[in-house]
Image (cartoon, rainbow, N blue to C red):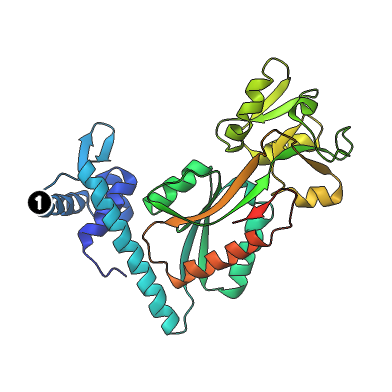
Amino acid sequence: MHIHSRSIVYFDMIRRCGSIREAARRLHVSSSAVNRQLLQLEGELNAALFDRLPTGLQLTVAGEAFSRHVLTVLQDQNRLLSELELLRGVHRGAIAIAAVEGLNADILPAVLAQMRQRYPGITLRVLTCGSDEVVRALIAGDADVGIGFAIQRHDHIRQCAVRHFGLGAVVPGGHPLAPSQRVSFADCAQYPLILPTQALSIWALLQPAIQHYKGRMHVCMEVSSVELGKRLASQGVGIFFQSRIGIETEIAEGALAHIPLDAPQATFSELGVYVRAGRSLPPAVDAFLQITLRAIETYPPVAGSSTL
């Protein structure tokens, strides 16, 4: 159901696809129809919305400004339809969530299961990606809610909640360091290390220590996946670094130990929940947010964690 101009729908699809032909294919109309709507829209606005490049269409400055307006219009439509459905007693709709991989082990499944139980008519679409992609998905309108670590402040997104989790060394339960209450990076550097690549937010947090001990540590592997790092650590390949999020089960079973890092300055991983700034949230999205915020707030307390 569309309650706004067809040209807006066509513009948004062109923006997403970067191609009139692909937009037409997804809209099940002819390319000429899509191009005609675009030209008409550009004529009404007296501005070119796309640069026509050999590699495809790219938004102009005017196109960027118009795209923000379009996202507001489309998301407001979804909110209105959701509110009308609630008035009719129908709990339907769809929510798109962009979340980092580290939440897949416990927090996110619990949130999704609870949401499904309370609102079985609402479809949930989950995109697993890095923190940078979480921001891009929110700004582009591809996600209603974003959850990620160490996300930089941005004018176009709004932080709904944040909690800090202390980083620690992750080792097998039988590792010599496992009984320790705290460890320094120097302690860890005596063993093979599994370090994150720049794709993971932990990379930036560990840089001061990595640069300080450069040449005095044995990096056996670099990975762009926290799940892979965790699995390698559990097999004794090396020491990995992360927060306790996603490894609570392994810690409880004794398969892994998480030892807080003893650093001159506390090293925290900041987990935040975000939505697009200036957006009026549909009831379904607001309900999902409340469940998510509660899950993060009540996550098993760990040494050095705090809720803001």
In the rendered view, tell whether residue 184 sits above or below residue 290. above
Camera-nearest residue between 194 and 1: 194
Camera-nearest residue between 39 and 159: 159
In the rendered image, residue 125, in percent from the top left (x then y), is placed at: 51, 58
Would you call the spot at circle 1 few (<14 residues within 10 Å), some (14-19), or many (20 or more)? few
Residue 214 appears left or right of 120: right
Residue 184 appears left or right of 198: right
Q: Is residue 300 visible?
A: yes
Q: How many marks?
A: 1
Q: Residue at x 49, y 77 (%)?
A: 91
Quarter of the image containing the N terminus?
Answer: bottom left
Camera-nearest residue between 264 and 269: 264
Q: Residue at x 24, y 67 (%)?
A: 4
- Identify residue type, mark 1: Gly
Q: Residue at x 23, y 46 (%)?
A: 63
Camera-nearest residue between 216 and 284: 216
Quarter location, residue 85 = bottom left
Residue 189 appears left or right of 17: right
In the rendered image, residue 282, in percent from the top left (x then y), is placed at: 42, 69
In the rendered view, tell whether residue 120 sits above or below residue 34. below
Q: Is residue 143 visible?
A: no
Q: Which element is circle 1 on?
A: helix
Q: Which residue is mark 1?
A: 43
Residue 18 appears left or right of 114: left
Q: Residue at x 28, y 48 (%)?
A: 14
Seen from this angle, which residue lies furthest top? Answer: 215
In the rendered image, residue 215, in percent from the top left (x then y), is placed at: 69, 14
Seen from this angle, which residue lies furthest front? Answer: 264
In the rendered image, residue 192, in percent from the top left (x then y), is placed at: 77, 24
